[in-house]
Image (cartoon, rainbow, N blue to C red):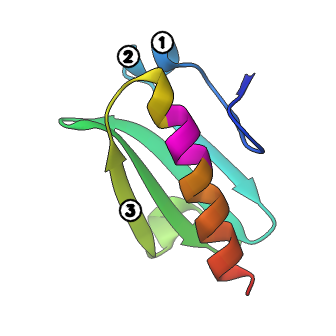
Amino acid sequence: MLKYGTWDLPGEDYFQAKNSFKGSRDNLRFIISPCEDGIKASVWKGEKCLELSEIIAEKTFELCEQSLYEINEYLTAQYNLLNS
C-alpha cells in the first residue's frame, strides 16, 4: 500500500493488472476498479456489501499515478459529505 493522502491505496501497477480494490472508513465503503476509460471509484454507505447496497457516487479517472491522488481527494470529499 502507498500513501496518496489519507487513504491507503495500491499503486498504479495494481490497477493496470486489472485488479479491483475495496476499502472502508467508518460508514463509507468504496471500490476502485479498472474500467474501459481508466479506473472508476464507486462509493456506498452502510455495513452491507456492494452487492446488497446502492452506489451513492461514482467517478471515472484516467489510469495514472496522479489519479490516485485525485481519487484520494474524491474519497475524502465523499466521506465529508456522508458525515456532515
Image location (x, y in percent) of residue 37? 20, 37
The crowd level at tag 2 (other Cα within 10 Å; few <14, some 14-19, many 20+) is some
Q: Which residue is mark 2?
A: 16
The answer to whether residue 34 is magenta is no
Helix, strand or loop at disc 3? Answer: strand
Quadrant location of residue 78?
bottom right
Compared to residue 30, the image places residue 32 above or below, namely above
Tell me the amino acid under the disc marked 1: Asp
Q: Using the numbered discs, state the Cα–Cα distance from disc 2 to disc 3 in whole angstroms.
A: 19 Å
Residue at 45 percent across and 35 percent down: it is: 67
Helix, strand or loop at disc 1? Answer: helix
Q: Quadrant of the N terminus?
A: top right
Q: Which residue is mark 1?
A: 13
Q: Which residue is mark 3?
A: 58
Tell me the amino acid under the disc marked 2: Gln
Out of 25 and 83, give the one closest to the viewer.
83
Quadrant location of residue 62?
top left
Which residues fall within the magenta stretch? 68-72
Can residue 20 be seen in this snapshot? no
Q: Using the numbered discs, state the Cα–Cα distance from disc 1 to disc 2 in whole angstroms.
A: 5 Å
